[in-house]
Image (spheres, rainbow, N blue to C red):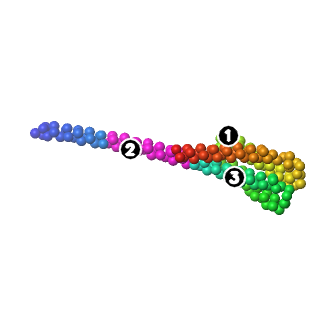
């Protein structure tokens, strides 16, 4: 009798163990799938974060360059006219140039070599133009006018502006995808 009872219990125990094993296996598979999904979400969030930071860097560079370029243009254009307004404009220019240089220095990590060259080219052109304005303001009109290259100032800024706009748009598009 005991033997018959054991014979009836063994299949039930094996069946229960098999069912528990299947549940355990299925839960392990589900858990691993969830962990992979969470890891993929974290990687996407991390990538989006850095893409957003890059887009912000390009926008910051562009804003600082636009302000500096506009004030430089005004300063050189008005040099030698009204000393007091030019002195005020020169102070604004110093601030804008320092801001552009600072932003360029801190955001350079997001730039490729070609883009760094565009930033440096624009900074150099602006600095050369400011020097020309200083010469004109200081009474050396002829030397200042020879030094300033309006076409270079406009072209370098246009190239820089086009590139930064493209980079920012690319990053925003990558975030959206």
Return the residue found at the far left. 1
| Foreground residue among 22 and 147 | 147
Q: Which residue is mark 1?
A: 113
Residue 113 visible from this viewpoint: yes
* Cα gap from disc 1 to disc 3, whole angstroms: 20 Å
The quarter of the image holding the N terminus is top left
Q: Which residue is mark 2?
A: 31
Q: Earlier in the sequence, mark 1 or mark 2?
A: 2
Q: Residue at x 50, y 44 (%)?
A: 43
* Cα gap from disc 1 to disc 2, whole angstroms: 44 Å
Quarter of the rendering containing residue 115? top right
Position of residue 79 measured from the top left corner of the image (x, y, whole percent):
83, 55
Q: Earlier in the sequence, mark 3 or mark 2?
A: 2
Residue 125 visible from this viewpoint: no
Quarter of the rendering containing residue 20? top left
Q: Secondary structure at mark 1?
A: helix
**Mark 1 or mark 3, whichever is nearer to me:** 3
Q: Residue at x 67, y 45 (%)?
A: 162
- For this view, does 125 lie left or right of residue 26? right
Position of residue 14 measured from the top left corner of the image (x, y, whole percent):
23, 38
Position of residue 138 measured from the top left corner of the image (x, y, whole percent):
87, 55
Specify start and end residues of the magenta stretch as a single range.
Answer: 24-51
Determine whether 87 is above or below 45 in the image: below
Q: Which residue is mark 3?
A: 64
Q: Residue at x 26, y 39 (%)?
A: 18
Q: Say which mark, if any, is on residue 17.
A: none
| Foreground residue among 48 and 6 | 48
Mark 1: few/some/many CA within 10 Å (<14, 14-19, 20+)? few
């Amino acid at each position: 009798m005991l033997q018959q009872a054991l014979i009836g219990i063994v299949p039930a125990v094996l069946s229960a163990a098999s069912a528990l094993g299947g549940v355990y296996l299925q839960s392990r598979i589900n858990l691993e799938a969830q962990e992979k999904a969470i890891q993929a979400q974290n990687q996407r969030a991390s990538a989006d974060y850095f893409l957003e930071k890059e887009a912000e860097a390009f926008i910051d560079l562009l804003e600082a360059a636009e302000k500096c370029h506009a004030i430089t243009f005004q300063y050189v254009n008005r040099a030698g006219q009204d000393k007091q307004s030019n002195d005020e404009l020169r102070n604004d220019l110093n601030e804008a140039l320092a801001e552009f240089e600072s932003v360029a220095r801190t955001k350079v990590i997001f730039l490729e070599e070609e883009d760094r060259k565009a930033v440096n080219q624009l900074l150099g052109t602006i600095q050369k133009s400011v020097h020309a304005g200083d010469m004109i303001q200081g009474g050396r009109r002829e030397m200042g006018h020879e030094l300033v290259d309006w076409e270079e100032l406009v072209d370098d800024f246009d190239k820089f502006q086009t590139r930064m706009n493209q980079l920012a748009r690319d990053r925003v598009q990558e975030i959206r995808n």
